[in-house]
Each structure stands twice: as structure tokens, then as C-alpha cells.
Amino acid sequence: MARKKLIAGNWKMNCLSAEGVALAKAVAEKVKANKYDCDFLICPPFTLLGLVKKCLRGTKIALGAQDVHFAEFGAHTGDISPLMLKDLGCSYTIIGHSERRVDHKESNALINKKAVAAHQAGLNTVICIGETGAERDAGKTIKVCQDEINGSVPADATAKNTVIAYEPIWAIGTGKTPTATDVQEVHAAIRAALAKKLGKATAQKMRILYGGSVKPNNASELLKLPDVDGALIGGASLKADDFVAIAANALK
Ligand code: 13P
């Protein structure tokens, strides 16, 4: 079953207005100039969502946030609701990135609750999972991923409203990646865990992205693996040339 690749950029806490607009415009122009047969998603910080949305007009690049609260409105100082993201033109939000799991102590239960709220508001979610270096060394990678799938992915997840991102924490921003064999093994195990939870048909259609030091020079090897359906890119998404080159190499 063919799953269309998704090339997603997570800008994290980077860019002020001028830089963010320039980056979004550069990506938009490059994507427009080429007929890449994949989906694109850009997830800037909350502060830039409105500005970046304008830059993406007339392109097929989707806009996403990096987190969301589970409530619609109310007394949650500093938080942003799914309806607010919809209102800004987002169609996606990342949920449960390891940096949020660590910095904000987000649990699987909270991530699950956020995903349900996002889906109810009509947003698609990119739910992140992945093991630490210590867990990997202890041979627990697959067990950690299975537990995170079971806990974080809500029962209402469909192949349309949910994308999984496997991001080994030790590979994020380090220049290190697992071997292609390891990535394929973990992605296949994630798909099996999704099949158990959501049914085989849904699992077969659901996209599972790889994230962690994806660059133009390793994209082709990682993205041609049978269970890798795209990439969630941090550092390299901050350079328009690199971000788009990853798509070009992935489709080779
Ligand atoms: P890097 O591509 O910088 O390793 O970041 C990956 C990531 O965390 C994307 O969400």
C-alpha cells in the first residue's frame, strides 16, 4: 500500500519575524518550482504561525504548531488551544515531542488527551515517540516505543488524522542516526503496535516518520526504507536548501 511521504520541518524555538518569513518564503518558492510528489509541513513557533501562513498561500505546504493544549478556552495561562490553531490556519500540530516530554514533564496520558482534543477540532497530529540513549543501550527501544504508542495514541486515531514520528532522543541534534536496519526494525515494530491498537488496515495506511539528524546526505537511505513514510526534521529545516533537498533525495 503506497503511503505518500510527508516531509515535515520542526523549527523548534528558532527564528524572529524577518528570518522566519524569509525561510518560509524560500521554502515556498522551492517547493512551487518543483513538482515534488510528497506532502510538506512546516511547524514554526507559535509566534510566527500567522506570518508563515501568509507566506505559504498558493502552495500545498501545510502549517502546523509544535504543541497544543487540550482545552478549548479558559484559565490556562500561556497555553494555546486547538481552536486557536485552527483559527490561525493550522492543519497539524506536533504532540509529545521528546523536548516537551522532558522540559514540561508531559506524560503519555496528557499527550493522548491533547491528541483527542486536536482531532475533535479538526487538526491532524504528529505524535512523537522514541527512546533515550540509556534505554537503547539497555535493549529497551522497542518496548519503549510500544508503551508510548499504547499510551499516547488515542483510540480515535485514523491514518488521516494521525502521523507517528519515531525520534530516538539520542539522535536529535547530535548528528548520530541509527543504522538503516535499526530504523526499519523499529518502524516495523511501531506499525505492528499500531495494528494491535487500531487494526491492521489503519496501521497499514498510517504514516510513520523518522526524525533525528535527518540531513540531505542521509535522507535517501533512511526514507527509502519500507516502513519510513517521511521525516520530521529539526536543524536542517532551518535551511530552505537543505529542507527541500531532503525531499528531493527522499524521492529519488
Ligand atoms: P534534528 O533534525 O535537529 O536532529 O531534530 C529532530 C527533531 O527533534 C525534529 O522534531
Image (cartoon, rainbow, N blue to C red):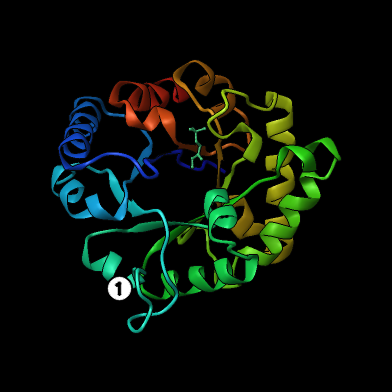
Q: Where is residue 178 drawn, in percent x and y? A: 68, 27
Q: Secondary structure at mark 1?
A: helix
Q: Is residue 234 above or below residue 221?
A: below
Residue 203 picture quarter: bottom right
Residue 75 picture quarter: bottom left
Q: Where is residue 158 drawn, in percent x and y? A: 53, 63
Q: Residues within 10 Å of mark 1 (few under 14, many from 20)?
A: many
Q: Is residue 16 above or below residue 73?
A: above
Residue at 29% in and 55% down: 46
Specify whether 119 is left or right of 178. Answer: left
Residue with the mark numbered 1? 83
- Can the viewer see residue 58 in this picture? no
Specify whether 64 is left or right of 205. Answer: left
In-front residue for pair 71/250 = 71
Residue 146 picture quarter: bottom right
- Can the viewer see residue 11 in this picture? yes
Q: Is residue 173 above or below residue 117?
A: above
Q: What amino acid type should be assigned to the residue bearing mark 1?
A: Leu
Residue at 30% in and 48% down: 62
Spot the residue most to the top.
217
Q: Where is residue 39 drawn, in percent x and y? A: 37, 41
Residue at 42% in and 70% down: 69
- The quarter of the image holding the C terminus is top left
Spot the residue most to the bottom.
74
Residue at 58% in and 56% down: 101
